[in-house]
Image (cartoon, helix red, strand yellow):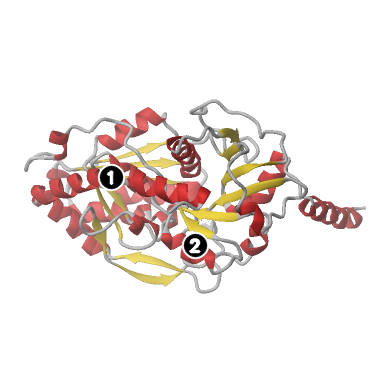
Protein backbone atom coordinates (compact mmCIF):
# COMPACT_ATOMS: atom_id res chain seq x y z
CA UNK A 1 0.00 0.00 0.00
CA UNK A 2 2.84 2.36 0.86
CA UNK A 3 4.50 1.81 -2.50
CA UNK A 4 1.27 2.77 -4.31
CA UNK A 5 0.71 5.88 -2.17
CA UNK A 6 3.91 7.75 -2.95
CA UNK A 7 3.46 7.73 -6.76
CA UNK A 8 -0.17 8.82 -6.29
CA UNK A 9 0.98 11.73 -4.17
CA UNK A 10 3.47 12.74 -6.83
CA UNK A 11 0.78 12.59 -9.53
CA UNK A 12 -1.63 14.65 -7.41
CA UNK A 13 1.08 17.25 -6.80
CA UNK A 14 1.85 17.50 -10.52
CA UNK A 15 -1.84 17.93 -11.32
CA UNK A 16 -2.11 20.74 -8.76
CA UNK A 17 0.94 22.42 -10.27
CA UNK A 18 -0.49 22.08 -13.78
CA UNK A 19 -3.56 24.02 -12.65
CA UNK A 20 -1.47 26.96 -11.41
CA UNK A 21 -1.19 30.16 -13.48
CA UNK A 22 1.16 30.31 -16.46
CA UNK A 23 1.23 34.01 -17.38
CA UNK A 24 2.22 35.11 -20.86
CA UNK A 25 4.12 38.21 -21.98
CA UNK A 26 0.87 40.03 -22.73
CA UNK A 27 -0.12 39.79 -19.06
CA UNK A 28 2.66 42.21 -18.14
CA UNK A 29 1.09 44.90 -20.31
CA UNK A 30 -2.28 44.76 -18.60
CA UNK A 31 -3.38 48.20 -17.35
CA UNK A 32 -3.76 48.68 -13.60
CA UNK A 33 -7.54 48.73 -13.82
CA UNK A 34 -8.11 45.66 -11.66
CA UNK A 35 -7.38 45.05 -7.98
CA UNK A 36 -3.78 45.31 -6.75
CA UNK A 37 -2.95 42.70 -4.11
CA UNK A 38 0.10 42.16 -1.93
CA UNK A 39 0.33 38.67 -0.44
CA UNK A 40 2.99 38.13 2.22
CA UNK A 41 3.89 37.42 5.82
CA UNK A 42 2.07 40.32 7.44
CA UNK A 43 2.00 38.67 10.87
CA UNK A 44 5.68 37.97 11.30
CA UNK A 45 8.54 40.23 12.42
CA UNK A 46 11.00 38.65 9.99
CA UNK A 47 12.72 40.59 7.23
CA UNK A 48 10.31 38.95 4.80
CA UNK A 49 7.37 40.32 6.76
CA UNK A 50 8.90 43.80 6.85
CA UNK A 51 9.47 43.64 3.08
CA UNK A 52 5.77 42.94 2.51
CA UNK A 53 4.79 45.91 4.68
CA UNK A 54 7.19 48.21 2.84
CA UNK A 55 5.73 47.06 -0.48
CA UNK A 56 2.29 48.13 0.70
CA UNK A 57 3.61 51.51 1.84
CA UNK A 58 5.29 52.06 -1.52
CA UNK A 59 2.11 51.29 -3.43
CA UNK A 60 0.14 53.67 -1.23
CA UNK A 61 2.68 56.40 -1.93
CA UNK A 62 1.86 55.89 -5.62
CA UNK A 63 -1.82 56.48 -4.83
CA UNK A 64 -2.87 52.83 -5.02
CA UNK A 65 -5.03 51.02 -2.45
CA UNK A 66 -3.71 47.47 -2.35
CA UNK A 67 -5.49 44.59 -0.68
CA UNK A 68 -3.33 42.86 1.94
CA UNK A 69 -3.56 39.06 2.00
CA UNK A 70 -1.71 37.31 4.80
CA UNK A 71 0.20 34.08 4.20
CA UNK A 72 1.79 33.79 7.65
CA UNK A 73 -0.53 31.00 8.80
CA UNK A 74 -0.03 29.00 5.62
CA UNK A 75 3.72 28.96 6.28
CA UNK A 76 3.48 28.78 10.09
CA UNK A 77 5.20 32.08 10.72
CA UNK A 78 2.76 33.94 12.95
CA UNK A 79 4.53 35.80 15.77
CA UNK A 80 2.85 39.24 15.92
CA UNK A 81 -0.35 41.11 15.21
CA UNK A 82 -0.88 42.46 11.67
CA UNK A 83 0.12 46.07 11.11
CA UNK A 84 -2.96 46.81 9.00
CA UNK A 85 -6.34 45.49 7.92
CA UNK A 86 -6.08 42.17 6.11
CA UNK A 87 -8.36 40.95 3.34
CA UNK A 88 -8.80 38.13 0.85
CA UNK A 89 -7.85 37.77 -2.77
CA UNK A 90 -10.68 39.33 -4.83
CA UNK A 91 -12.58 36.67 -6.77
CA UNK A 92 -11.94 38.19 -10.15
CA UNK A 93 -10.10 36.71 -13.11
CA UNK A 94 -7.94 39.78 -13.54
CA UNK A 95 -5.67 41.94 -11.41
CA UNK A 96 -2.10 42.47 -10.21
CA UNK A 97 -0.68 40.25 -7.50
CA UNK A 98 2.67 40.90 -5.79
CA UNK A 99 3.98 37.86 -3.93
CA UNK A 100 6.34 39.16 -1.22
CA UNK A 101 7.61 35.70 -0.25
CA UNK A 102 10.59 33.43 -0.80
CA UNK A 103 10.84 32.00 -4.30
CA UNK A 104 10.41 28.32 -3.26
CA UNK A 105 7.09 29.19 -1.57
CA UNK A 106 5.52 30.49 -4.81
CA UNK A 107 3.54 27.40 -5.78
CA UNK A 108 2.21 26.81 -2.28
CA UNK A 109 1.19 30.48 -2.07
CA UNK A 110 -0.65 30.39 -5.41
CA UNK A 111 -2.47 27.23 -4.34
CA UNK A 112 -3.41 28.85 -1.02
CA UNK A 113 -4.69 31.94 -2.83
CA UNK A 114 -6.74 29.85 -5.24
CA UNK A 115 -5.33 31.24 -8.47
CA UNK A 116 -5.70 28.92 -11.45
CA UNK A 117 -4.36 28.61 -14.96
CA UNK A 118 -7.43 30.15 -16.58
CA UNK A 119 -7.14 33.33 -14.50
CA UNK A 120 -5.65 36.39 -16.19
CA UNK A 121 -3.65 37.92 -13.36
CA UNK A 122 -0.36 39.75 -13.62
CA UNK A 123 1.74 37.92 -11.02
CA UNK A 124 4.91 39.52 -9.67
CA UNK A 125 7.35 37.62 -7.50
CA UNK A 126 9.25 39.95 -5.15
CA UNK A 127 12.33 37.82 -4.58
CA UNK A 128 15.39 38.29 -2.42
CA UNK A 129 18.40 35.98 -2.48
CA UNK A 130 21.73 36.24 -0.75
CA UNK A 131 24.17 34.21 -2.86
CA UNK A 132 25.76 35.14 -6.18
CA UNK A 133 24.26 32.06 -7.85
CA UNK A 134 20.53 31.28 -7.97
CA UNK A 135 19.26 27.71 -7.50
CA UNK A 136 18.47 25.99 -10.85
CA UNK A 137 15.10 24.94 -9.39
CA UNK A 138 13.93 28.55 -9.61
CA UNK A 139 13.64 28.44 -13.41
CA UNK A 140 10.43 26.34 -13.46
CA UNK A 141 9.04 28.33 -10.51
CA UNK A 142 9.48 31.53 -12.50
CA UNK A 143 7.15 30.02 -15.11
CA UNK A 144 4.23 30.85 -12.82
CA UNK A 145 5.12 34.56 -12.81
CA UNK A 146 4.81 37.46 -15.19
CA UNK A 147 7.92 39.15 -13.86
CA UNK A 148 10.24 39.30 -10.85
CA UNK A 149 11.17 42.26 -8.66
CA UNK A 150 14.27 42.26 -6.48
CA UNK A 151 15.46 44.77 -3.84
CA UNK A 152 18.99 45.20 -5.24
CA UNK A 153 21.04 45.06 -8.41
CA UNK A 154 23.06 42.28 -6.77
CA UNK A 155 19.98 40.04 -6.66
CA UNK A 156 18.81 41.13 -10.11
CA UNK A 157 22.11 40.10 -11.70
CA UNK A 158 21.99 36.75 -9.94
CA UNK A 159 18.41 35.85 -10.85
CA UNK A 160 18.24 37.31 -14.36
CA UNK A 161 20.80 34.78 -15.55
CA UNK A 162 18.55 31.88 -14.53
CA UNK A 163 15.04 32.90 -15.61
CA UNK A 164 13.34 33.81 -18.87
CA UNK A 165 11.06 36.61 -17.68
CA UNK A 166 11.83 40.28 -16.87
CA UNK A 167 13.73 40.89 -13.63
CA UNK A 168 13.52 44.46 -12.29
CA UNK A 169 15.26 46.13 -9.36
CA UNK A 170 12.80 47.75 -6.93
CA UNK A 171 14.54 48.68 -3.65
CA UNK A 172 12.53 48.85 -0.44
CA UNK A 173 11.11 52.31 0.49
CA UNK A 174 12.59 52.43 3.99
CA UNK A 175 11.39 55.32 6.15
CA UNK A 176 12.41 56.26 9.70
CA UNK A 177 9.66 55.47 12.19
CA UNK A 178 10.97 58.02 14.68
CA UNK A 179 11.74 61.71 14.46
CA UNK A 180 15.48 62.31 14.43
CA UNK A 181 17.00 64.97 16.65
CA UNK A 182 20.01 66.29 14.68
CA UNK A 183 21.87 67.01 17.93
CA UNK A 184 21.67 63.34 18.91
CA UNK A 185 23.83 62.39 15.90
CA UNK A 186 26.87 63.86 17.63
CA UNK A 187 28.40 61.79 20.42
CA UNK A 188 31.09 63.85 22.16
CA UNK A 189 34.46 62.29 22.90
CA UNK A 190 34.42 60.39 26.16
CA UNK A 191 30.78 59.30 25.92
CA UNK A 192 30.25 55.53 25.56
CA UNK A 193 30.00 54.20 22.01
CA UNK A 194 26.88 52.07 21.50
CA UNK A 195 27.13 49.29 18.90
CA UNK A 196 24.36 46.95 17.75
CA UNK A 197 24.13 43.75 15.69
CA UNK A 198 20.92 41.96 14.60
CA UNK A 199 20.11 38.54 13.15
CA UNK A 200 17.33 35.97 12.75
CA UNK A 201 18.34 32.33 12.99
CA UNK A 202 15.95 31.36 10.21
CA UNK A 203 17.90 33.68 7.94
CA UNK A 204 21.10 31.86 9.00
CA UNK A 205 23.25 33.02 11.89
CA UNK A 206 26.22 31.73 9.92
CA UNK A 207 25.42 33.87 6.87
CA UNK A 208 24.79 36.85 9.12
CA UNK A 209 28.14 35.99 10.74
CA UNK A 210 27.08 37.09 14.21
CA UNK A 211 30.06 35.46 15.90
CA UNK A 212 32.42 37.60 13.81
CA UNK A 213 30.57 40.73 14.94
CA UNK A 214 31.07 39.69 18.57
CA UNK A 215 34.75 38.87 17.99
CA UNK A 216 35.34 42.22 16.28
CA UNK A 217 33.81 44.11 19.18
CA UNK A 218 35.78 42.10 21.75
CA UNK A 219 39.01 42.80 19.83
CA UNK A 220 38.20 46.48 19.51
CA UNK A 221 37.28 47.28 23.11
CA UNK A 222 37.91 46.16 26.65
CA UNK A 223 35.17 46.44 29.28
CA UNK A 224 37.04 49.44 30.71
CA UNK A 225 36.40 51.36 27.48
CA UNK A 226 32.76 51.90 28.57
CA UNK A 227 31.44 51.02 25.10
CA UNK A 228 28.50 48.62 24.76
CA UNK A 229 27.42 45.98 22.25
CA UNK A 230 23.81 44.85 21.92
CA UNK A 231 23.12 41.64 19.96
CA UNK A 232 19.43 41.32 19.03
CA UNK A 233 18.48 37.79 17.94
CA UNK A 234 15.37 35.85 16.89
CA UNK A 235 14.74 32.09 16.80
CA UNK A 236 17.88 31.33 18.82
CA UNK A 237 16.47 28.21 20.48
CA UNK A 238 16.38 26.47 17.09
CA UNK A 239 20.18 26.69 16.92
CA UNK A 240 21.57 25.57 20.33
CA UNK A 241 25.12 25.07 19.01
CA UNK A 242 25.26 28.69 17.88
CA UNK A 243 23.78 29.84 21.17
CA UNK A 244 26.41 27.98 23.19
CA UNK A 245 29.25 29.26 21.01
CA UNK A 246 28.06 32.85 21.30
CA UNK A 247 27.78 32.71 25.09
CA UNK A 248 31.21 31.05 25.33
CA UNK A 249 32.72 33.78 23.15
CA UNK A 250 31.21 36.57 25.23
CA UNK A 251 32.10 34.93 28.54
CA UNK A 252 31.73 37.29 31.46
CA UNK A 253 31.83 40.51 29.41
CA UNK A 254 29.32 42.76 31.15
CA UNK A 255 29.47 45.30 28.31
CA UNK A 256 27.70 42.95 25.89
CA UNK A 257 23.93 42.45 26.05
CA UNK A 258 22.02 39.70 24.24
CA UNK A 259 18.31 40.26 23.57
CA UNK A 260 16.41 37.23 22.29
CA UNK A 261 12.92 36.89 20.85
CA UNK A 262 10.41 39.00 18.97
CA UNK A 263 9.65 42.49 20.26
CA UNK A 264 6.92 44.92 19.11
CA UNK A 265 7.78 47.12 16.14
CA UNK A 266 7.79 50.35 18.15
CA UNK A 267 10.15 48.82 20.70
CA UNK A 268 12.45 47.60 17.92
CA UNK A 269 12.74 51.09 16.43
CA UNK A 270 13.41 52.60 19.89
CA UNK A 271 16.09 49.99 20.51
CA UNK A 272 17.88 50.69 17.23
CA UNK A 273 17.68 54.45 17.76
CA UNK A 274 19.42 54.14 21.13
CA UNK A 275 22.67 53.06 19.40
CA UNK A 276 25.35 54.82 17.37
CA UNK A 277 26.52 52.03 15.06
CA UNK A 278 24.81 49.11 13.33
CA UNK A 279 27.45 46.44 12.78
CA UNK A 280 26.96 43.75 10.14
CA UNK A 281 29.75 41.30 9.34
CA UNK A 282 27.54 39.35 6.96
CA UNK A 283 28.85 36.88 4.44
CA UNK A 284 26.08 37.92 2.04
CA UNK A 285 22.89 40.00 1.98
CA UNK A 286 20.10 40.25 -0.55
CA UNK A 287 19.47 43.81 0.62
CA UNK A 288 20.32 44.36 4.30
CA UNK A 289 17.04 45.80 5.54
CA UNK A 290 18.23 46.24 9.14
CA UNK A 291 21.14 48.33 7.86
CA UNK A 292 18.81 50.57 5.83
CA UNK A 293 16.48 50.95 8.81
CA UNK A 294 19.40 51.88 11.06
CA UNK A 295 20.74 54.43 8.59
CA UNK A 296 17.29 56.01 8.26
CA UNK A 297 17.45 56.64 12.03
CA UNK A 298 20.92 58.17 11.83
CA UNK A 299 23.10 55.24 12.84
CA UNK A 300 26.47 54.74 11.22
CA UNK A 301 26.33 51.47 9.30
CA UNK A 302 29.55 49.44 9.55
CA UNK A 303 29.19 46.45 7.26
CA UNK A 304 30.80 44.06 4.81
CA UNK A 305 31.36 45.90 1.54
CA UNK A 306 29.78 43.21 -0.62
CA UNK A 307 26.40 42.03 -1.90
CA UNK A 308 22.96 43.64 -1.65
CA UNK A 309 23.75 46.29 0.96
CA UNK A 310 25.97 48.11 -1.55
CA UNK A 311 22.69 49.13 -3.20
CA UNK A 312 22.53 51.97 -0.67
CA UNK A 313 25.83 51.88 1.24
CA UNK A 314 28.98 53.61 0.00
CA UNK A 315 32.15 55.13 1.41
CA UNK A 316 30.45 58.51 1.83
CA UNK A 317 27.48 57.43 3.95
CA UNK A 318 28.84 54.40 5.84
CA UNK A 319 31.92 52.35 6.69
CA UNK A 320 32.41 49.39 4.33
CA UNK A 321 34.61 46.61 5.68
CA UNK A 322 37.20 44.79 3.54
CA UNK A 323 36.67 41.13 2.66
CA UNK A 324 37.77 38.26 0.45
CA UNK A 325 35.48 35.82 -1.37
CA UNK A 326 35.32 32.12 -0.57
CA UNK A 327 33.16 29.15 -1.56
CA UNK A 328 29.86 28.83 0.31
CA UNK A 329 29.90 26.18 3.04
CA UNK A 330 27.02 26.39 5.52
CA UNK A 331 27.47 24.23 8.65
CA UNK A 332 23.82 24.84 9.60
CA UNK A 333 22.61 23.46 6.24
CA UNK A 334 20.20 26.34 5.63
CA UNK A 335 21.82 26.83 2.22
CA UNK A 336 22.36 24.14 -0.39
CA UNK A 337 24.61 26.37 -2.50
CA UNK A 338 24.46 26.14 -6.30
CA UNK A 339 27.74 25.41 -8.07
CA UNK A 340 29.94 28.51 -8.14
CA UNK A 341 28.38 30.14 -5.09
CA UNK A 342 30.67 32.41 -3.12
CA UNK A 343 30.30 34.79 -0.24
CA UNK A 344 32.45 37.16 1.77
CA UNK A 345 34.99 36.41 4.46
CA UNK A 346 35.31 39.55 6.53
CA UNK A 347 38.69 40.95 7.62
CA UNK A 348 38.07 40.90 11.38
CA UNK A 349 41.24 42.79 12.29
CA UNK A 350 40.23 45.61 9.93
CA UNK A 351 36.72 45.57 11.38
CA UNK A 352 38.03 46.00 14.91
CA UNK A 353 40.24 48.87 13.75
CA UNK A 354 37.26 50.62 12.12
CA UNK A 355 35.33 50.51 15.40
CA UNK A 356 38.31 51.86 17.33
CA UNK A 357 38.83 54.64 14.78
CA UNK A 358 35.18 55.69 14.96
CA UNK A 359 35.36 55.73 18.74
CA UNK A 360 38.38 58.06 18.59
CA UNK A 361 37.28 60.24 15.67
CA UNK A 362 33.81 61.34 16.78
CA UNK A 363 33.70 64.02 14.06
CA UNK A 364 33.92 61.32 11.38
CA UNK A 365 31.28 59.29 13.19
CA UNK A 366 28.99 62.33 13.18
CA UNK A 367 29.58 62.97 9.47
CA UNK A 368 28.71 59.39 8.60
CA UNK A 369 25.59 59.50 10.75
CA UNK A 370 24.50 62.74 9.07
CA UNK A 371 25.17 61.24 5.63
CA UNK A 372 23.14 58.17 6.60
CA UNK A 373 20.08 60.30 7.42
CA UNK A 374 20.49 62.10 4.08
CA UNK A 375 20.28 58.82 2.16
CA UNK A 376 16.93 58.84 0.35
CA UNK A 377 15.64 55.27 0.40
CA UNK A 378 12.14 56.29 -0.66
CA UNK A 379 12.57 58.33 -3.85
CA UNK A 380 14.55 55.71 -5.76
CA UNK A 381 12.22 52.97 -4.58
CA UNK A 382 9.01 54.73 -5.56
CA UNK A 383 10.43 55.69 -8.96
CA UNK A 384 11.49 52.10 -9.61
CA UNK A 385 8.14 50.73 -8.42
CA UNK A 386 6.21 53.13 -10.66
CA UNK A 387 8.35 52.20 -13.64
CA UNK A 388 7.93 48.50 -12.92
CA UNK A 389 4.15 48.77 -12.66
CA UNK A 390 3.46 51.12 -15.54
CA UNK A 391 6.57 51.29 -17.67
CA UNK A 392 6.80 55.03 -16.92
CA UNK A 393 10.19 56.72 -17.40
Discs 1/2, front: 1
Classed neighbour count for the residue bearing mark 1: other residues with Cα under 10 Å, few (<14), some (14–19), many (≥20): many
Q: Residue at x 58, y 64 (%)?
A: 135
* Viewer can see residue 230: no
Classed neighbour count for the residue bearing mark 2: other residues with Cα under 10 Å, few (<14), some (14–19), many (≥20): some
Q: Residue furthest left?
A: 189
Residue 64 in the figure: left or right of residue 185: right
**Towards the viewer: 189 or 86:** 86
Residue 326 in the figure: left or right of residue 362: right
In the image, residue 116 sits, relative to residue 6, either above or below, namely: above
Q: Position of residue 368 (x, y in %)?
A: 18, 50
Badge 2 marks a residue whose secondary structure is loop
Q: Position of residue 248 (x, y in %)?
A: 35, 49
The residue where tag 2 is placed is 330
Q: Which mark is residue 147?
A: none
**Towards the viewer: 283 or 365:** 365
The residue where tag 1 is placed is 295
Give the image quarter of residue 207.
Answer: bottom left
Quadrant, the C terminus: bottom left
Q: Residue at x 40, y 31 (%)?
A: 265
Q: Earlier in the sequence, mark 1 or mark 2?
A: 1
Q: Position of residue 279 (x, y in %)?
A: 29, 50
Amino acid sequence: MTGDFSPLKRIARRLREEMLPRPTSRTRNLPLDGPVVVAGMFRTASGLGEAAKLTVQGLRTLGLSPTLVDLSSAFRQVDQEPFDMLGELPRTHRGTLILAINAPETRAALQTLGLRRWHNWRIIGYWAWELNEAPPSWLPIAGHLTEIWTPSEFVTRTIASKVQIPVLTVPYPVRPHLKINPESLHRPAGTPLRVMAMADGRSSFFRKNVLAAARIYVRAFSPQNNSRLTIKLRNVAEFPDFQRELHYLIGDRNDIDIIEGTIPSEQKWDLIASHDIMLSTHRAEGYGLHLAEAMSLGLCAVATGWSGNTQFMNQKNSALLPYSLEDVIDPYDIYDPPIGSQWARIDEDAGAQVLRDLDIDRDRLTRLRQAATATDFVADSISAMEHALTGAN
